[in-house]
Every structure is written in C-alpha cells, then in structure tokens.
Image: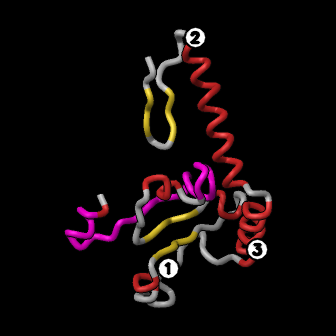
Amino acid sequence: MVKICHDNGILFVADEIQSGMGRTGKMFAIENWDVEPDIIAVGKSLAAGMPLAAVVGKADIMDSIHPWGLGGTYGGNPICCAAALAVLEIIESEHLVEKAHELGKKLYSRFEQWQKKFDIVGGIRGLGQCWESR
C-alpha cells in the first residue's frame, strides 16, 4: 500500500484515532506491520477522553504547512494538552504498551480454549485479521 501511494505521489496516512496509544501492544497499530506512514492521526485516548487530536508526521511534511494549517475542533486546548501529557506519562511509567501486548496474548490463548470447547465460537479476530483454527 505504501509503495502504491508513493509511486503515485500520495501520502500514506495511518488513522490511529481508535487503534493508537498502545491498544495493540505497540504505541501505534501500524507498527505491527513494519510500515512507516507519512502522517499519523491520533485522538480519543490521547487525552483520556478530553477533546484533543493530533497529527504526527515526517518533518519535511509537517514543516511545509503554514502555522494555522493544522487546526481543528480538537486542537490545542491547554487543559486537554495537560491531560495528554499526563496520559503519555502514565503510558510510559506504568508500561501500558507492554501490558497491552501481554494481555492480548492471554486473551488469544483463552479465546482458543473457548473455540475448542464451545461450537458457537468461530474465528478469533485481532489486529485486523481473522484466524480460523477449525
């Protein structure tokens, strides 16, 4: 996908609004596929539910935008920014990304047990994939 975008002069954007901030055992879900996006959109859990969003990108792209070009409904409120700093500190100090990774492994193992025990359990899904072990 990245190659197609770059071959056609298109920026590759990763939407991490719902999947980012450590939820998949990596800070950003895109890291699970060893892909480097040009821009990442972040929100929701960035500020623990406070209305804040962010756009993260390569320096040459971010520096090319005029100062007021990255605004929006959820940008820059000082209280929300303070909340985001607290969230990032907690993610780091409590090792939440690593804990999410370990919890994901435990859940997958439990789901496999349920899949073997209960006919009603079909595929096990995670990180945008579906594993059928039957």
Image spot of residue 130 (x, y percent): 43, 32
Q: Which residues are magenta?
A: 3-26
Mark 3 belongs to which amino acid? Answer: Ala
Residue identified by numbered label 3:
82
Left or right: residue 76 compared with residue 12:
right
The label on residue 70 is 1
Query: Which residue is at 64% across, 32% downward?
Result: 107
Mark 1 belongs to which amino acid? Answer: Leu
Which tag is nearer the camera, tag 1 or tag 2?
2
Q: How many marks?
A: 3
Q: Residues within 10 Å of mark 2 (few under 14, many from 20)?
A: few
Q: In the image, is residue 8 above or below residue 60?
A: above
Residue identified by numbered label 2:
118
* 119 inside magenta stretch: no
The label on residue 42 is none
Question: Mark 3: which secondary structure?
Answer: helix
Left or right: residue 112 compared with residue 1:
right
Q: Earlier in the sequence, mark 3 or mark 1?
A: 1
Which tag is nearer the camera, tag 3 or tag 1?
3
- Closest to the observer: 113 or 69? 113
Question: Mark 2: which secondary structure?
Answer: loop
Mark 2 belongs to which amino acid? Answer: Phe
Query: Which residue is at 60% across, 59% downward?
Result: 27
Query: Which residue is at 68% across, 52% downward?
Result: 98
- Closest to the observer: 36 or 74? 36
Q: Residues within 10 Å of mark 1 (few under 14, many from 20)?
A: few
